[in-house]
């Protein structure tokens, strides 16, 4: 009794793999089209308008959501002291944030901010500012020099090439983190 040797035509194996690759590429294309048409991909997520009725709130803690926009009606929250918004998808802050005269703490770390509105300099009671981890943030507006109560500033993990002038003019500053930037 001898051994049987199985012989395959390599073109059969090649055809099998080419079919699988074609099916996988077709699935990838279909999945990409599905995601492109997805409402979630095109819908800009923001806070509901019904929040306007809660103007007595003094603190907002909104962490790790898909929120992209802070609404302009934020100016209605005159009692606001703490605005803690880390790890969201926020791309810009409204100029109206400068009307929060009682704001003491602003944390917008690990979002997608590319700039900070100059109007933030009108928040005369601000003590803590955390803009770390926005990756594309390159500068702070000079108007933040008006923040005379600030003791804590964290602008680490951004794209600052130098220490912003406004930070150097914050007379009560005690803690500054500017690590992991493009400082030369």
Image (spheres, rainbow, N blue to C red):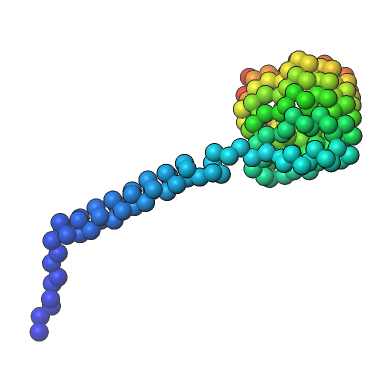
Q: Quadrant of residue 165?
A: top right
The answer to which of 167 and 126 lies nearer the viewer is 126
The quarter in which the N terminus is drawn is bottom left
The picture places residue 122, in percent across and down from the top left corner, at 84, 20
x 54%, y 38%: residue: 42
Seen in the image, is 104 located left or right of residue 176?
right
The picture places residue 60, in percent across and down from the top left corner, at 81, 41
The quarter in which the C terminus is drawn is top right
The answer to which of 120 and 159 lies nearer the viewer is 120
The answer to which of 104 and 58 lies nearer the viewer is 58
Seen in the image, is 52 located left or right of residue 134?
right
Q: Quadrant of residue 74?
A: top right
The picture places residue 69, in percent across and down from the top left corner, at 68, 34
x 20%, y 59%: residue: 13
Residue sticking out furthest to the bottom: 1
x 58%, y 39%: residue: 43
Vertical order, 63 against 161 (above or below): below
The picture places residue 105, in percent across and down from the top left corner, at 83, 34
Residue 174 appears anywhere in the view: no
The answer to which of 48 and 29 lies nearer the viewer is 48
x 56%, y 44%: residue: 40
């Amino acid at each position: 009794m001898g051994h049987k040797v199985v012989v395959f035509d390599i073109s059969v194996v090649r055809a099998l793999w080419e079919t699988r690759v074609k099916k996988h590429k077709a699935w990838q294309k279909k999945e990409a089209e599905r995601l492109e048409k997805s409402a979630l991909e095109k819908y800009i997520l923001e806070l509901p308008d019904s929040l306007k009725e809660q103007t007595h709130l003094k603190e907002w803690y909104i962490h790790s959501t898909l929120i992209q926009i802070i609404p302009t009606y934020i100016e209605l929250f005159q009692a606001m002291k703490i605005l803690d918004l880390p790890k969201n998808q926020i791309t810009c802050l409204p100029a109206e944030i400068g009307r929060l005269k009682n704001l003491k703490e602003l944390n917008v770390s690990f979002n997608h901010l590319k700039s900070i509105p100059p109007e933030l300099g009108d928040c005369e009671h601000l003590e803590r500012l955390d803009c770390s981890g926005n990756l594309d943030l390159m500068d702070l507006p000079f108007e933040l020099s008006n923040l005379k109560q600030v003791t804590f500033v964290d602008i680490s993990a951004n794209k600052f090439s130098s220490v912003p002038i406004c930070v150097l003019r914050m007379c009560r500053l005690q803690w500054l983190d500017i690590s992991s930037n493009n400082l030369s």
